[in-house]
Image: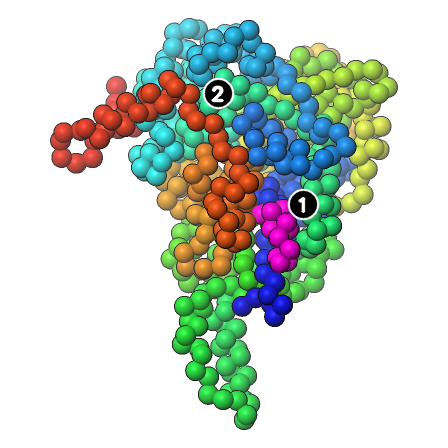
Amino acid sequence: MQEADGRRRVVVVGAGWGGLSVAHKLSMDADTDVTVVDAAPRPGGLVSDSFLTPGGRRAEAGQHGFWDEYHNIFALLDSLKLPEDPLTGYAEQGQYSPQGLEAVWPVYRDQKQKLPTGLGQALYTRFLKLPLTDLASAAPLVLAFSEFDGSEEAYARYDEISFYDLCVKLGVSRRMYDEAFEPMVLTGLFAPGNQCSAAAALGMAYFFVLKHQTSFDVRWCRGNVGEKIFAPWVEQMMQRGVTFVPSTRATGFVTRGQRRAEEAAAAANNDDAAPGATAAAARADDAAIAAVRCEGCEGDGGASSTLLEADEVVFAVGAAALAAMVRGAPELSRHAEWRRYARLRGTGVLATRLYLDRRLETPYSANACWGFDRGVGMTWFDITKLHGLGDEKKGEGDGSDGSDGSDGSDGSDGSESGDGSESGDGSESEVESEAAEGSVIEVDFYHAQSLLVMSDEQIVAKAKADLDTMLGADCAAAAVLDAAVVRLPQAVNWYCPGSYADLPSLRSEAVPNAYFVGDLVKSAHGSWSQEKAYVTGIEAANAILGKPDGDGIVPLDADEPHVKLGRDAVAAARSAWPLPGKPPSFADFLF
Protein backbone atom coordinates (compact mmCIF):
# COMPACT_ATOMS: atom_id res chain seq x y z
CA MET A 1 0.00 0.00 0.00
CA GLN A 2 2.82 2.36 -0.87
CA GLU A 3 2.31 5.68 -2.57
CA ALA A 4 1.39 5.65 -6.25
CA ASP A 5 4.96 6.55 -7.16
CA GLY A 6 6.24 3.50 -5.25
CA ARG A 7 7.84 5.47 -2.42
CA ARG A 8 7.85 3.92 1.04
CA ARG A 9 6.36 6.09 3.83
CA VAL A 10 7.79 5.48 7.31
CA VAL A 11 6.53 7.21 10.45
CA VAL A 12 8.89 7.12 13.44
CA VAL A 13 7.34 7.85 16.84
CA GLY A 14 10.06 9.17 19.14
CA ALA A 15 13.26 11.13 18.48
CA GLY A 16 15.76 9.63 20.91
CA TRP A 17 18.80 7.59 19.92
CA GLY A 18 16.70 4.76 18.49
CA GLY A 19 14.28 6.94 16.54
CA LEU A 20 17.03 9.11 15.09
CA SER A 21 19.09 6.02 14.25
CA VAL A 22 16.35 4.40 12.15
CA ALA A 23 15.59 7.74 10.47
CA HIS A 24 19.29 8.22 9.73
CA LYS A 25 19.68 4.93 7.87
CA LEU A 26 16.32 5.14 6.10
CA SER A 27 17.20 8.64 4.90
CA MET A 28 20.01 7.12 2.86
CA ASP A 29 17.42 5.28 0.75
CA ALA A 30 16.19 7.42 -2.16
CA ASP A 31 12.80 5.67 -2.27
CA THR A 32 11.86 6.17 1.40
CA ASP A 33 10.10 9.17 2.97
CA VAL A 34 10.64 9.46 6.74
CA THR A 35 8.60 11.50 9.22
CA VAL A 36 9.74 11.68 12.86
CA VAL A 37 7.14 12.66 15.48
CA ASP A 38 8.22 13.57 19.00
CA ALA A 39 6.49 15.08 22.03
CA ALA A 40 9.48 17.27 22.96
CA PRO A 41 10.20 20.58 21.21
CA ARG A 42 13.76 19.45 20.46
CA PRO A 43 14.97 15.97 19.43
CA GLY A 44 16.86 13.71 21.79
CA GLY A 45 14.37 11.73 23.86
CA LEU A 46 15.92 11.45 27.32
CA VAL A 47 19.01 13.23 25.98
CA SER A 48 16.98 16.25 24.89
CA ASP A 49 18.08 19.71 25.99
CA SER A 50 14.52 21.06 25.80
CA PHE A 51 14.57 22.43 29.34
CA LEU A 52 15.23 25.97 30.58
CA THR A 53 16.14 27.37 33.97
CA PRO A 54 14.18 30.36 35.34
CA GLY A 55 17.14 32.45 34.14
CA GLY A 56 16.79 31.17 30.57
CA ARG A 57 19.76 28.79 30.57
CA ARG A 58 19.28 25.58 28.62
CA ALA A 59 19.64 22.28 30.47
CA GLU A 60 19.52 18.58 29.68
CA ALA A 61 17.59 15.74 31.24
CA GLY A 62 20.66 14.38 33.01
CA GLN A 63 24.18 13.53 31.91
CA HIS A 64 24.85 10.68 29.49
CA GLY A 65 28.22 8.99 29.09
CA PHE A 66 29.83 7.47 26.01
CA TRP A 67 31.48 4.25 27.14
CA ASP A 68 34.33 2.42 25.49
CA GLU A 69 32.06 -0.22 23.93
CA TYR A 70 29.93 2.39 22.09
CA HIS A 71 31.53 1.42 18.77
CA ASN A 72 28.50 2.20 16.62
CA ILE A 73 27.84 5.62 18.14
CA PHE A 74 31.53 6.50 17.77
CA ALA A 75 31.30 5.44 14.10
CA LEU A 76 28.27 7.73 13.69
CA LEU A 77 30.12 10.69 15.20
CA ASP A 78 32.99 10.10 12.78
CA SER A 79 30.58 9.97 9.84
CA LEU A 80 28.91 13.26 10.79
CA LYS A 81 32.23 15.09 10.23
CA LEU A 82 31.49 17.62 12.96
CA PRO A 83 33.75 20.69 13.09
CA GLU A 84 35.24 19.54 16.40
CA ASP A 85 35.23 16.41 18.53
CA PRO A 86 32.11 16.73 20.71
CA LEU A 87 33.47 14.41 23.41
CA THR A 88 35.94 14.92 26.24
CA GLY A 89 39.00 12.82 26.82
CA TYR A 90 39.25 10.21 29.55
CA ALA A 91 39.74 11.00 33.24
CA GLU A 92 39.50 9.33 36.64
CA GLN A 93 36.10 9.05 38.28
CA GLY A 94 35.15 9.34 41.93
CA GLN A 95 32.65 7.67 44.23
CA TYR A 96 31.34 9.45 47.33
CA SER A 97 29.21 8.68 50.36
CA PRO A 98 28.19 11.06 53.18
CA GLN A 99 31.46 10.01 54.84
CA GLY A 100 33.57 11.31 51.95
CA LEU A 101 35.46 9.82 49.01
CA GLU A 102 35.05 6.05 48.89
CA ALA A 103 36.64 4.90 45.63
CA VAL A 104 38.43 6.07 42.50
CA TRP A 105 38.03 4.49 39.09
CA PRO A 106 41.19 5.05 37.06
CA VAL A 107 41.49 5.40 33.30
CA TYR A 108 41.93 1.69 32.69
CA ARG A 109 43.49 2.13 29.25
CA ASP A 110 46.31 4.17 30.86
CA GLN A 111 47.44 1.43 33.26
CA LYS A 112 50.91 -0.01 32.76
CA GLN A 113 49.70 -3.45 31.78
CA LYS A 114 46.53 -4.70 30.12
CA LEU A 115 45.24 -7.63 32.16
CA PRO A 116 42.49 -10.18 31.54
CA THR A 117 39.10 -8.60 32.12
CA GLY A 118 37.93 -8.93 35.69
CA LEU A 119 41.47 -9.14 37.03
CA GLY A 120 42.39 -5.72 35.65
CA GLN A 121 39.35 -4.03 37.15
CA ALA A 122 39.91 -5.77 40.49
CA LEU A 123 43.55 -4.71 40.76
CA TYR A 124 43.37 -1.20 39.33
CA THR A 125 40.16 0.12 40.92
CA ARG A 126 41.04 1.95 44.14
CA PHE A 127 38.53 1.15 46.88
CA LEU A 128 39.71 3.36 49.73
CA LYS A 129 37.71 1.87 52.60
CA LEU A 130 36.32 -1.54 51.60
CA PRO A 131 38.22 -4.37 53.33
CA LEU A 132 39.81 -7.05 51.16
CA THR A 133 37.56 -9.68 52.71
CA ASP A 134 34.48 -7.86 51.42
CA LEU A 135 36.03 -7.35 47.99
CA ALA A 136 36.87 -11.06 47.83
CA SER A 137 33.26 -11.98 48.58
CA ALA A 138 32.34 -10.82 45.05
CA ALA A 139 34.38 -13.64 43.47
CA PRO A 140 31.48 -16.16 43.26
CA LEU A 141 29.69 -13.81 40.85
CA VAL A 142 32.19 -15.09 38.27
CA LEU A 143 30.10 -18.27 38.24
CA ALA A 144 26.97 -16.33 37.30
CA PHE A 145 28.79 -14.37 34.59
CA SER A 146 30.11 -17.67 33.20
CA GLU A 147 26.60 -19.08 32.96
CA PHE A 148 24.84 -15.92 31.78
CA ASP A 149 25.74 -15.62 28.09
CA GLY A 150 22.86 -13.35 27.02
CA SER A 151 20.93 -16.17 25.34
CA GLU A 152 17.18 -16.63 25.67
CA GLU A 153 17.82 -19.65 27.91
CA ALA A 154 20.10 -17.58 30.17
CA TYR A 155 17.48 -14.84 30.47
CA ALA A 156 14.87 -17.45 31.36
CA ARG A 157 17.08 -18.62 34.26
CA TYR A 158 18.21 -15.26 35.61
CA ASP A 159 15.33 -12.88 34.88
CA GLU A 160 13.02 -14.40 37.49
CA ILE A 161 15.22 -13.45 40.45
CA SER A 162 16.48 -10.07 41.58
CA PHE A 163 20.12 -9.08 41.47
CA TYR A 164 20.09 -8.64 45.23
CA ASP A 165 18.84 -12.22 45.73
CA LEU A 166 21.52 -13.51 43.37
CA CYS A 167 24.24 -11.74 45.36
CA VAL A 168 22.87 -13.14 48.63
CA LYS A 169 22.76 -16.66 47.18
CA LEU A 170 26.36 -16.41 45.98
CA GLY A 171 27.67 -15.12 49.31
CA VAL A 172 28.47 -11.48 48.46
CA SER A 173 28.99 -9.62 51.73
CA ARG A 174 26.45 -7.03 52.81
CA ARG A 175 29.01 -4.25 52.79
CA MET A 176 30.30 -5.17 49.32
CA TYR A 177 26.76 -5.16 48.02
CA ASP A 178 25.74 -1.88 49.69
CA GLU A 179 28.87 0.08 48.77
CA ALA A 180 29.73 -1.32 45.32
CA PHE A 181 26.94 -3.25 43.65
CA GLU A 182 23.85 -1.37 44.81
CA PRO A 183 25.24 2.01 43.58
CA MET A 184 26.17 0.37 40.26
CA VAL A 185 22.65 -0.96 39.72
CA LEU A 186 20.96 2.24 40.86
CA THR A 187 22.94 4.37 38.41
CA GLY A 188 23.05 1.80 35.59
CA LEU A 189 19.52 0.36 35.72
CA PHE A 190 17.87 3.15 37.75
CA ALA A 191 16.35 0.96 40.46
CA PRO A 192 17.53 -0.88 43.60
CA GLY A 193 18.99 -4.34 43.18
CA ASN A 194 16.07 -6.01 44.94
CA GLN A 195 13.79 -4.57 42.26
CA CYS A 196 16.05 -5.28 39.25
CA SER A 197 16.26 -8.48 37.26
CA ALA A 198 19.50 -10.37 37.82
CA ALA A 199 19.62 -10.96 34.05
CA ALA A 200 19.47 -7.24 33.34
CA ALA A 201 22.13 -6.47 35.96
CA LEU A 202 24.51 -9.14 34.64
CA GLY A 203 24.02 -8.01 31.04
CA MET A 204 24.49 -4.34 31.90
CA ALA A 205 27.56 -4.95 34.08
CA TYR A 206 29.24 -7.18 31.50
CA PHE A 207 28.78 -4.59 28.73
CA PHE A 208 29.75 -1.49 30.73
CA VAL A 209 32.39 -2.93 33.07
CA LEU A 210 33.60 -6.41 32.23
CA LYS A 211 33.68 -6.89 28.45
CA HIS A 212 37.29 -5.68 28.49
CA GLN A 213 39.55 -3.97 31.01
CA THR A 214 38.85 -0.66 29.28
CA SER A 215 35.05 -1.04 29.08
CA PHE A 216 34.36 1.35 31.96
CA ASP A 217 36.46 4.11 30.43
CA VAL A 218 33.96 6.81 29.51
CA ARG A 219 33.84 10.13 27.71
CA TRP A 220 31.29 12.90 28.12
CA CYS A 221 29.94 15.55 25.80
CA ARG A 222 31.77 18.90 25.80
CA GLY A 223 28.39 20.65 25.83
CA ASN A 224 24.75 19.67 25.84
CA VAL A 225 24.32 16.57 23.67
CA GLY A 226 21.33 18.22 21.99
CA GLU A 227 23.47 21.11 20.75
CA LYS A 228 26.74 19.30 20.02
CA ILE A 229 25.45 16.07 18.47
CA PHE A 230 21.70 15.94 17.84
CA ALA A 231 21.29 19.38 16.26
CA PRO A 232 23.87 18.85 13.48
CA TRP A 233 22.75 15.23 13.03
CA VAL A 234 19.12 16.28 12.60
CA GLU A 235 20.15 19.07 10.23
CA GLN A 236 21.93 16.58 7.99
CA MET A 237 18.88 14.30 7.96
CA MET A 238 16.60 17.22 7.09
CA GLN A 239 18.86 17.99 4.15
CA ARG A 240 18.22 14.43 2.96
CA GLY A 241 14.47 14.97 3.20
CA VAL A 242 13.52 13.69 6.67
CA THR A 243 10.55 15.58 8.14
CA PHE A 244 10.61 16.31 11.87
CA VAL A 245 7.35 17.10 13.69
CA PRO A 246 8.26 18.31 17.21
CA SER A 247 5.96 19.01 20.18
CA THR A 248 3.52 16.46 18.80
CA ARG A 249 2.23 13.19 20.24
CA ALA A 250 0.99 10.09 18.45
CA THR A 251 -2.48 9.65 19.93
CA GLY A 252 -4.11 6.95 17.79
CA PHE A 253 -3.86 4.70 14.77
CA VAL A 254 -5.92 3.73 11.72
CA THR A 255 -5.48 0.14 10.56
CA ARG A 256 -5.66 -1.07 7.00
CA GLY A 257 -8.72 -3.08 7.95
CA GLN A 258 -10.45 0.08 9.20
CA ARG A 259 -9.42 1.93 6.05
CA ARG A 260 -10.87 -0.81 3.83
CA ALA A 261 -14.08 -0.84 5.85
CA GLU A 262 -14.40 2.93 5.36
CA GLU A 263 -13.80 2.57 1.63
CA ALA A 264 -16.31 -0.28 1.40
CA ALA A 265 -18.93 1.79 3.22
CA ALA A 266 -18.31 4.69 0.88
CA ALA A 267 -18.53 2.41 -2.14
CA ALA A 268 -21.82 0.97 -0.90
CA ASN A 269 -23.31 4.43 -1.22
CA ASN A 270 -22.05 4.71 -4.79
CA ASP A 271 -24.57 3.33 -7.28
CA ASP A 272 -21.82 2.75 -9.85
CA ALA A 273 -19.58 0.72 -7.51
CA ALA A 274 -18.92 -2.86 -8.47
CA PRO A 275 -19.33 -5.55 -5.78
CA GLY A 276 -16.18 -5.55 -3.62
CA ALA A 277 -14.49 -8.91 -3.94
CA THR A 278 -10.99 -7.90 -2.86
CA ALA A 279 -11.62 -7.52 0.86
CA ALA A 280 -11.24 -11.22 1.70
CA ALA A 281 -7.90 -11.50 -0.10
CA ALA A 282 -6.52 -8.50 1.76
CA ARG A 283 -7.57 -9.43 5.30
CA ALA A 284 -4.20 -10.94 6.17
CA ASP A 285 -2.80 -7.45 6.76
CA ASP A 286 -5.92 -5.85 8.24
CA ALA A 287 -4.05 -5.27 11.54
CA ALA A 288 -1.29 -3.31 9.82
CA ILE A 289 -1.20 0.43 10.56
CA ALA A 290 -2.28 2.63 7.67
CA ALA A 291 -1.99 6.00 9.40
CA VAL A 292 -0.91 7.60 12.68
CA ARG A 293 -3.12 10.19 14.39
CA CYS A 294 -1.15 13.05 15.94
CA GLU A 295 -1.97 15.97 18.22
CA GLY A 296 0.18 18.99 19.01
CA CYS A 297 1.31 19.40 22.60
CA GLU A 298 -0.58 22.29 24.17
CA GLY A 299 1.48 25.45 24.46
CA ASP A 300 4.57 24.03 22.70
CA GLY A 301 3.71 25.03 19.15
CA GLY A 302 3.29 21.49 17.86
CA ALA A 303 1.35 20.47 14.80
CA SER A 304 -2.42 20.64 15.07
CA SER A 305 -4.44 17.45 14.72
CA THR A 306 -3.10 15.57 11.71
CA LEU A 307 -3.12 12.14 10.12
CA LEU A 308 0.19 10.75 8.84
CA GLU A 309 -0.15 8.01 6.21
CA ALA A 310 2.29 5.16 6.78
CA ASP A 311 3.55 1.99 5.13
CA GLU A 312 5.75 1.20 8.13
CA VAL A 313 5.62 2.54 11.70
CA VAL A 314 8.54 2.52 14.13
CA PHE A 315 7.87 2.86 17.87
CA ALA A 316 10.94 4.51 19.40
CA VAL A 317 9.60 5.20 22.88
CA GLY A 318 10.34 3.97 26.39
CA ALA A 319 8.46 1.39 28.43
CA ALA A 320 5.98 3.72 30.16
CA ALA A 321 5.20 5.60 26.94
CA LEU A 322 4.63 2.35 25.05
CA ALA A 323 2.34 1.06 27.80
CA ALA A 324 0.35 4.30 27.67
CA MET A 325 -0.04 4.04 23.90
CA VAL A 326 -1.42 0.52 24.20
CA ARG A 327 -3.90 1.59 26.87
CA GLY A 328 -5.11 4.46 24.69
CA ALA A 329 -5.32 2.66 21.33
CA PRO A 330 -7.92 -0.10 20.86
CA GLU A 331 -6.29 -0.88 17.50
CA LEU A 332 -3.27 -2.07 19.46
CA SER A 333 -4.81 -3.40 22.68
CA ARG A 334 -6.93 -5.92 20.74
CA HIS A 335 -3.75 -7.98 20.31
CA ALA A 336 -2.43 -10.18 23.14
CA GLU A 337 1.13 -9.34 22.11
CA TRP A 338 0.53 -5.62 22.65
CA ARG A 339 -1.45 -6.04 25.85
CA ARG A 340 1.60 -7.49 27.54
CA TYR A 341 3.39 -4.20 26.88
CA ALA A 342 0.89 -2.55 29.22
CA ARG A 343 2.73 -4.33 32.05
CA LEU A 344 5.97 -2.50 31.27
CA ARG A 345 6.96 0.22 33.72
CA GLY A 346 9.23 3.19 33.98
CA THR A 347 10.96 4.63 37.00
CA GLY A 348 11.68 8.24 37.94
CA VAL A 349 14.76 10.37 37.33
CA LEU A 350 15.37 13.85 38.71
CA ALA A 351 18.03 16.01 37.06
CA THR A 352 19.26 19.26 38.58
CA ARG A 353 21.82 21.76 37.33
CA LEU A 354 23.09 24.36 39.80
CA TYR A 355 24.73 27.63 38.72
CA LEU A 356 26.96 28.83 41.58
CA ASP A 357 28.44 32.23 42.27
CA ARG A 358 32.02 30.99 42.59
CA ARG A 359 34.37 28.45 41.08
CA LEU A 360 34.81 25.21 43.04
CA GLU A 361 37.82 22.92 42.85
CA THR A 362 36.42 19.43 42.34
CA PRO A 363 38.76 16.41 42.51
CA TYR A 364 36.86 14.51 39.80
CA SER A 365 34.57 15.86 37.13
CA ALA A 366 32.15 12.92 37.27
CA ASN A 367 31.13 10.99 40.37
CA ALA A 368 28.75 8.31 41.62
CA CYS A 369 27.33 8.39 45.16
CA TRP A 370 25.67 6.12 47.68
CA GLY A 371 24.19 6.42 51.15
CA PHE A 372 22.33 9.73 50.84
CA ASP A 373 18.75 8.44 50.33
CA ARG A 374 17.67 4.83 50.71
CA GLY A 375 16.86 3.26 47.38
CA VAL A 376 17.88 6.36 45.39
CA GLY A 377 20.91 6.45 43.09
CA MET A 378 22.89 9.64 42.67
CA THR A 379 25.61 11.08 40.45
CA TRP A 380 27.13 14.53 40.16
CA PHE A 381 29.20 16.23 37.48
CA ASP A 382 31.33 19.34 37.23
CA ILE A 383 29.77 20.79 34.07
CA THR A 384 32.24 23.68 34.20
CA LYS A 385 35.06 21.23 33.50
CA LEU A 386 33.23 18.86 31.16
CA HIS A 387 31.91 21.69 28.96
CA GLY A 388 35.09 23.74 29.23
CA LEU A 389 33.21 26.79 30.51
CA GLY A 390 35.58 29.70 31.00
CA ASP A 391 38.57 27.82 29.54
CA GLU A 392 39.34 30.57 27.06
CA LYS A 393 39.30 33.22 29.76
CA LYS A 394 41.22 31.32 32.41
CA GLY A 395 43.40 29.13 30.19
CA GLU A 396 42.11 26.01 31.92
CA GLY A 397 41.39 22.79 30.08
CA ASP A 398 39.89 19.54 31.25
CA GLY A 399 39.75 16.46 29.11
CA SER A 400 37.71 14.80 31.78
CA ASP A 401 34.87 12.39 31.87
CA GLY A 402 33.37 10.43 34.66
CA SER A 403 31.06 8.04 36.34
CA ASP A 404 27.74 6.48 35.59
CA GLY A 405 24.43 8.02 34.70
CA SER A 406 23.84 6.09 31.49
CA ASP A 407 20.45 6.45 29.96
CA GLY A 408 18.35 3.09 29.80
CA SER A 409 15.58 4.58 27.70
CA ASP A 410 14.70 5.87 24.29
CA GLY A 411 11.39 7.35 25.35
CA SER A 412 10.56 10.98 24.86
CA ASP A 413 7.35 11.18 26.87
CA GLY A 414 6.74 11.79 30.54
CA SER A 415 9.25 14.57 31.14
CA GLU A 416 8.68 18.02 32.49
CA SER A 417 10.86 20.90 33.57
CA GLY A 418 10.71 22.33 37.04
CA ASP A 419 9.83 25.81 35.84
CA GLY A 420 7.15 24.48 33.50
CA SER A 421 9.10 25.40 30.39
CA GLU A 422 10.39 22.93 27.84
CA SER A 423 11.22 25.31 25.04
CA GLY A 424 12.71 28.68 24.40
CA ASP A 425 15.73 30.43 23.02
CA GLY A 426 18.30 29.83 25.76
CA SER A 427 21.60 30.52 24.03
CA GLU A 428 24.56 28.25 24.76
CA SER A 429 26.99 31.13 24.22
CA GLU A 430 25.11 33.23 26.77
CA VAL A 431 25.10 30.35 29.24
CA GLU A 432 28.83 29.78 28.87
CA SER A 433 29.56 33.47 29.32
CA GLU A 434 27.40 33.74 32.41
CA ALA A 435 28.85 30.55 33.90
CA ALA A 436 32.49 31.44 33.27
CA GLU A 437 33.03 32.94 36.75
CA GLY A 438 31.20 30.30 38.81
CA SER A 439 30.88 26.54 38.76
CA VAL A 440 28.01 24.70 37.14
CA ILE A 441 27.31 21.40 38.90
CA GLU A 442 24.85 18.74 37.73
CA VAL A 443 23.29 16.50 40.40
CA ASP A 444 21.11 13.66 39.12
CA PHE A 445 18.97 11.21 41.10
CA TYR A 446 17.68 7.81 39.96
CA HIS A 447 14.66 5.82 41.18
CA ALA A 448 13.74 9.22 42.51
CA GLN A 449 9.99 8.93 43.15
CA SER A 450 10.47 9.92 46.79
CA LEU A 451 12.18 13.15 45.68
CA LEU A 452 9.88 14.10 42.80
CA VAL A 453 7.16 15.09 45.28
CA MET A 454 9.33 17.96 46.58
CA SER A 455 9.05 21.53 45.33
CA ASP A 456 11.72 22.96 43.04
CA GLU A 457 13.09 25.04 45.91
CA GLN A 458 13.33 21.98 48.18
CA ILE A 459 15.03 19.95 45.46
CA VAL A 460 17.63 22.64 44.79
CA ALA A 461 18.30 22.96 48.52
CA LYS A 462 18.71 19.19 48.87
CA ALA A 463 21.07 18.92 45.91
CA LYS A 464 23.18 21.78 47.26
CA ALA A 465 23.25 20.29 50.77
CA ASP A 466 24.43 16.93 49.41
CA LEU A 467 27.21 18.67 47.50
CA ASP A 468 28.17 20.59 50.64
CA THR A 469 28.50 17.29 52.50
CA MET A 470 30.89 15.91 49.88
CA LEU A 471 32.86 19.02 48.93
CA GLY A 472 33.04 20.83 52.27
CA ALA A 473 33.31 24.47 53.30
CA ASP A 474 34.12 25.98 49.90
CA CYS A 475 30.93 24.53 48.43
CA ALA A 476 28.90 25.49 51.49
CA ALA A 477 30.01 29.10 51.05
CA ALA A 478 28.79 29.20 47.44
CA ALA A 479 25.33 30.52 46.60
CA VAL A 480 23.01 29.18 43.91
CA LEU A 481 22.31 31.87 41.31
CA ASP A 482 20.10 29.80 39.01
CA ALA A 483 19.02 26.17 38.78
CA ALA A 484 17.34 23.73 36.43
CA VAL A 485 15.02 21.10 37.88
CA VAL A 486 14.01 18.45 35.33
CA ARG A 487 11.46 15.88 36.47
CA LEU A 488 11.17 12.58 34.58
CA PRO A 489 8.53 10.64 36.53
CA GLN A 490 8.47 7.37 34.53
CA ALA A 491 10.79 8.06 31.66
CA VAL A 492 13.47 5.37 32.11
CA ASN A 493 12.85 1.67 31.66
CA TRP A 494 12.46 -0.46 34.76
CA TYR A 495 13.87 -3.96 34.29
CA CYS A 496 12.16 -5.60 37.24
CA PRO A 497 12.33 -9.38 37.80
CA GLY A 498 10.18 -11.20 35.25
CA SER A 499 9.98 -8.25 32.85
CA TYR A 500 12.06 -9.80 30.08
CA ALA A 501 9.13 -11.87 28.83
CA ASP A 502 7.14 -8.67 28.26
CA LEU A 503 9.80 -6.80 26.30
CA PRO A 504 9.14 -6.31 22.58
CA SER A 505 11.16 -7.90 19.82
CA LEU A 506 12.35 -5.86 16.87
CA ARG A 507 9.22 -6.53 14.81
CA SER A 508 5.65 -7.02 15.94
CA GLU A 509 4.04 -10.36 15.22
CA ALA A 510 0.44 -9.10 15.39
CA VAL A 511 0.91 -5.79 13.53
CA PRO A 512 3.06 -6.74 10.53
CA ASN A 513 4.34 -3.26 9.68
CA ALA A 514 5.20 -2.16 13.24
CA TYR A 515 8.77 -2.14 14.59
CA PHE A 516 10.30 -1.36 17.97
CA VAL A 517 13.62 0.32 18.71
CA GLY A 518 15.28 1.44 21.92
CA ASP A 519 17.14 -0.16 24.78
CA LEU A 520 14.04 -2.06 25.94
CA VAL A 521 13.98 -4.09 22.70
CA LYS A 522 15.33 -7.64 22.67
CA SER A 523 18.52 -7.78 20.62
CA ALA A 524 21.30 -10.31 20.18
CA HIS A 525 23.90 -7.56 19.76
CA GLY A 526 24.79 -7.49 23.46
CA SER A 527 24.94 -3.72 23.97
CA TRP A 528 23.01 -1.60 26.47
CA SER A 529 21.65 1.90 26.93
CA GLN A 530 22.29 4.51 24.22
CA GLU A 531 24.41 2.12 22.15
CA LYS A 532 21.67 -0.51 22.17
CA ALA A 533 19.02 2.05 21.23
CA TYR A 534 21.17 3.20 18.31
CA VAL A 535 21.91 -0.38 17.18
CA THR A 536 18.26 -1.45 17.26
CA GLY A 537 17.47 1.58 15.09
CA ILE A 538 19.86 0.26 12.44
CA GLU A 539 18.38 -3.23 12.85
CA ALA A 540 14.85 -1.90 12.24
CA ALA A 541 15.97 0.08 9.18
CA ASN A 542 17.62 -3.05 7.80
CA ALA A 543 14.40 -5.02 8.27
CA ILE A 544 12.34 -2.31 6.55
CA LEU A 545 14.77 -2.03 3.63
CA GLY A 546 15.23 -5.79 3.28
CA LYS A 547 18.94 -5.61 4.08
CA PRO A 548 20.94 -8.24 6.02
CA ASP A 549 20.43 -8.05 9.78
CA GLY A 550 23.95 -6.85 10.55
CA ASP A 551 24.33 -4.38 7.69
CA GLY A 552 26.12 -1.27 8.93
CA ILE A 553 26.43 -2.58 12.52
CA VAL A 554 29.75 -2.91 14.34
CA PRO A 555 29.52 -6.13 16.40
CA LEU A 556 30.91 -6.43 19.89
CA ASP A 557 34.29 -8.10 20.20
CA ALA A 558 34.35 -11.79 20.97
CA ASP A 559 34.61 -12.76 24.64
CA GLU A 560 38.15 -12.81 25.98
CA PRO A 561 39.68 -16.33 26.00
CA HIS A 562 39.27 -16.97 29.73
CA VAL A 563 35.63 -15.77 29.63
CA LYS A 564 34.90 -18.01 26.64
CA LEU A 565 36.60 -20.93 28.38
CA GLY A 566 34.41 -20.46 31.46
CA ARG A 567 31.22 -20.17 29.45
CA ASP A 568 32.09 -23.18 27.31
CA ALA A 569 32.80 -25.22 30.44
CA VAL A 570 29.48 -24.30 32.03
CA ALA A 571 27.62 -25.04 28.78
CA ALA A 572 29.34 -28.44 28.48
CA ALA A 573 28.50 -29.33 32.07
CA ARG A 574 24.86 -28.43 31.56
CA SER A 575 24.58 -30.38 28.31
CA ALA A 576 26.12 -33.45 29.99
CA TRP A 577 23.74 -33.37 32.98
CA PRO A 578 22.73 -37.02 33.43
CA LEU A 579 19.51 -36.68 35.41
CA PRO A 580 15.97 -36.05 34.10
CA GLY A 581 14.72 -32.49 33.96
CA LYS A 582 16.65 -29.31 33.33
CA PRO A 583 20.15 -29.07 34.81
CA PRO A 584 20.68 -26.89 37.87
CA SER A 585 21.75 -23.26 37.57
CA PHE A 586 23.94 -21.06 39.74
CA ALA A 587 20.82 -18.93 40.01
CA ASP A 588 19.27 -21.80 41.99
CA PHE A 589 22.26 -22.53 44.22
CA LEU A 590 22.00 -21.42 47.82
CA PHE A 591 24.89 -21.23 50.27
Query: Judging from the image, what secondary structure is the residue with disc 2 in?
Result: loop
Magenta segment: does it hold 26?
A: yes
Q: Is 464 displayed left or right of 333 in the figure?
A: right
- Dividing the picture into quarters, in which one does residue 459 lie? top right
The quarter of the image holding the N terminus is bottom right
Amino acid on which disc 2 is placed: His
In the drawing, what numbered circle is on residue 379? none
Range shown magenta: 22-33
Q: Which residue is mark 1?
A: 43
Residue 404, visible in the rendered structure: no
Would you call the spot at circle 1 few (<14 residues within 10 Å), some (14-19), or many (20 or more)? Answer: many
Would you call the spot at circle 2 few (<14 residues within 10 Å), some (14-19), or many (20 or more)? Answer: many
- Dividing the picture into quarters, in which one does residue 196 lie? top left
Q: How many marks?
A: 2
Q: Nearer the viewer, residue 370 or 412?
A: 412
Residue 99: x %, y % from top left:
56, 12
- Which tag, 1 or 2, sits closer to the chain's start? 1
Amino acid on which disc 1 is placed: Pro
Residue 366: x %, y % from top left:
63, 21
Badges 1 and 2: C-beta atoms under 8 Å apart?
no
Residue 214: x %, y % from top left:
53, 19
Vertical order, 149 against 339 (above or below): above
| Residue drawn at x 73%, y 20% as measured from the top left | 385
Q: Is 538 displayed left or right of 469 in the figure?
A: left
Please tell me whether mark 1 or mark 2 is closer to you in this view.
Answer: 2
Query: Judging from the image, what secondary structure is the residue with disc 1 in?
Result: loop
- Dividing the picture into quarters, in which one does residue 500 lie? top left
Residue 480: x %, y % from top left:
76, 25
Q: Which residue is mark 2?
A: 212
Q: Nearer the viewer, residue 223 or 325?
A: 223
